[in-house]
């Protein structure tokens, strides 16, 4: 039994950090959260040629060769905050995953305009 709220996000260690070094090769570390992955990159970014954060789907979401970890972290935190805002529930009749009450998909926008006339 927990005392309080259960966590809203769970990680299974599938977020990985790849540390690429021209001399020693590639090291891959498993992280249990993006925060942990960011910390690993910050601790190692100057001792390796490149550091990458790889998401659960195998997509590289950060690479130190192209971006600064502090800039990426601030964008990631802002996006995380934006997504945590309560959104009015809306069921799109076209099953569009990007359709929300305040940001309708194109087909729902067309339906809305047509219903006004």
Image (cartoon, rainbow, N blue to C red):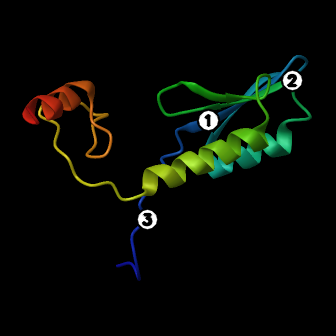
The tag on residue 16 is: 1
- Helix, strand or loop at label 1? It is strand
- Helix, strand or loop at label 2? It is loop
Left or right: where does residue 14 sit relative to residue 18? left
Residue 76 at x, y percent in the picture:
61, 44
Which mark is in front, 1 or 3? 3
Residue 64, quarter of picture? top right
- Helix, strand or loop at label 3? It is loop
Q: Distance from label 1 to label 3 (Cα)?
A: 21 Å
Q: Nearer the viewer, residue 17 or 87?
A: 87
Residue 95 appears in view: no
Discs 1, 3 touching: Cβ within 8 Å: no
Give the residue furthest to the front. 117
Rendered residue at 53%/50% (across/down): 80
- Using a 10 Å C-alpha cutoff, classify the residue at mark 2 as few (fewer than 14 neighbours), some (14 to 19) or many (20 or more): some
Residue 20 appears in view: yes
The tag on residue 49 is: 2
Question: Which residue corresponds to mark 3?
Answer: 7
Residue 37 at x, y percent in the picture:
67, 44
108 vs 8: above or below: above
Left or right: where does residue 108 sit relative to residue 11? left
Rendered residue at 76%/29% (across/down): 67
88 vs 73: above or below: below
Label located before the other in sequence (1 or 3): 3
Q: Nearer the viewer, residue 64 or 92?
A: 92
- Using a 10 Å C-alpha cutoff, classify the residue at mark 3 as few (fewer than 14 neighbours), some (14 to 19) or many (20 or more): few
């Amino acid at each position: 039994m927990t005392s309080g709220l259960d966590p809203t996000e769970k990680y299974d260690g599938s977020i990985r950090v790849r540390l690429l070094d021209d001399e020693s090769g590639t090291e891959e570390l498993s992280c249990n959260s993006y925060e942990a992955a960011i910390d690993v990159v910050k601790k190692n970014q100057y001792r390796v040629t490149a550091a990458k954060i790889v998401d659960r789907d195998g997509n590289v979401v950060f690479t130190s060769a192209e971006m600064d970890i502090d800039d990426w972290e601030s964008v990631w935190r802002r996006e995380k905050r934006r997504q945590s805002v309560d959104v009015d529930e809306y069921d799109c009749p076209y099953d569009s995953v990007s359709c929300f009450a305040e940001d309708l998909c194109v087909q729902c926008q067309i339906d809305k305009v047509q219903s006004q006339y």
